[in-house]
Image (spheres, rainbow, N blue to C red):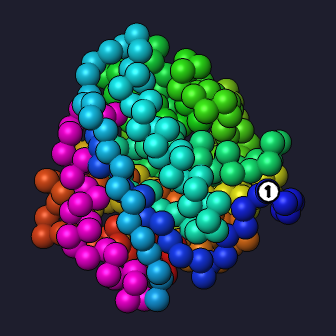
Amino acid sequence: MDSTAKNMSVATSSPLSLIAVMSCVGAQDQRCELGPSALKNFGMLQRLNALGKQSAWHALSSHNSFVVNHENPFSPILDLLDQIRATVLSSLQEQNQFCVLGGDHSCAIGTWNGVKQSLNPGSRLGLIWIDAHMDSHTPETSPSAAVHGMPLACLLGQGPDNVTNFAGLKPVLLPQDLCLIGVRSYEPEEARLLQQLGVKVFFMEDINRQGLSSILEQAKQLVCQHTDVFGCSIDIDAIDPEQAPGVGSPESNGIQAMDLVNALKIIRNAPGFVGAEIVEYNPAKDQNSKTASVVCDLAEAMFA
Ligand SMILES: [Mn+2]
């Protein structure tokens, strides 16, 4: 990894900014906007602090809500994306680690623009994307016009300039610096786009064959190879819905929660790891807070 004056190297002992995105502007089911406050009530902050991880809570929200607009699906979320970008950037400038808590997965567009902006021009960002879905639609291919199905395409520079270049950083991510893990539900247009770009995808079959720790190790090496920093974007629907039912779009036969918690320790002390996001928690669909408990376990595995 290159080390340059402006690139942020964040120590694992640094404080953690928990950036709560209390919005579901990018999804049809609006109840995930209640996710961050449910996690706060569950005691996430206290659990991290009890483990010695000094953590601070930053709440962000939007006045807008989801509307079907196939021509310009992004206009209602642009203001929120810019808030997320700015908050992630200032956390890194203060030498803090960050963990964005969704909210729907469209927040990723803001999160990783913020990280990219913290780097020197020309420096590269690596990203491990753990998700049951590919999130790689463009407005032309999306059946729903919901932006939480498009964030990865946007980060790769695919889609209209008002979102792919909203902070003047397009493309935020190069295809060779990205890796998907846990995919089991997608449309052919998304698979075609990722294949054309040469993005590495580890499907559930790969995890079942090789084990999650081996896959995550391979993913870490891939996203660190040509980059200066890297992060991790976790959609909770990657986990099996038996263990994490509180998500908007559950998909059966997913990753075992404890396997992910154990495997994430691989990235925790890796050089260049700057932060993560954990998204799509929908407390209205949770059962006895078991999904909230998994979210806390994931955050602790990466940060505490
Ligand atoms: Mn997702």
What secondary structure characterizes most of the magenta part?
Answer: helix
Check residue 236 for magenta coloring: no
Q: Foreground residue, 148 or 56?
A: 56
The reply, left or right, for residue 215 in relation to residue 227 is left
Q: Can residue 6 be seen in this view?
A: yes
Query: What secondary structure is found at the residue carrying circle 1?
Result: loop
**Residue 297, x across and y down, in percent:** 38, 75
Identity of the residue drawn at 48% across and 66% down: 17
Q: What stretch is highlighted in magenta?
A: 25-51
Q: Is residue 152 above or below residue 53?
A: above
Identity of the residue drawn at 47% across and 81% down: 54
Q: How many marks overall?
A: 1
The reply, left or right, for residue 197 in relation to residue 86 is right
Q: Foreground residue, 148 or 59?
A: 59
Q: In this view, does 128 lie above or below 187?
A: below
Residue tagged by mark 1?
6
Asked which quadrant contains residue 222, the reply is bottom right
Check residue 41 for magenta coloring: yes
Identity of the residue drawn at 31% across and 38% down: 62
Q: Badge 1, how many Cα within 10 Å: few under 14, some, many 20+?
A: few
Kind of residue sitting beneath label 1: Lys
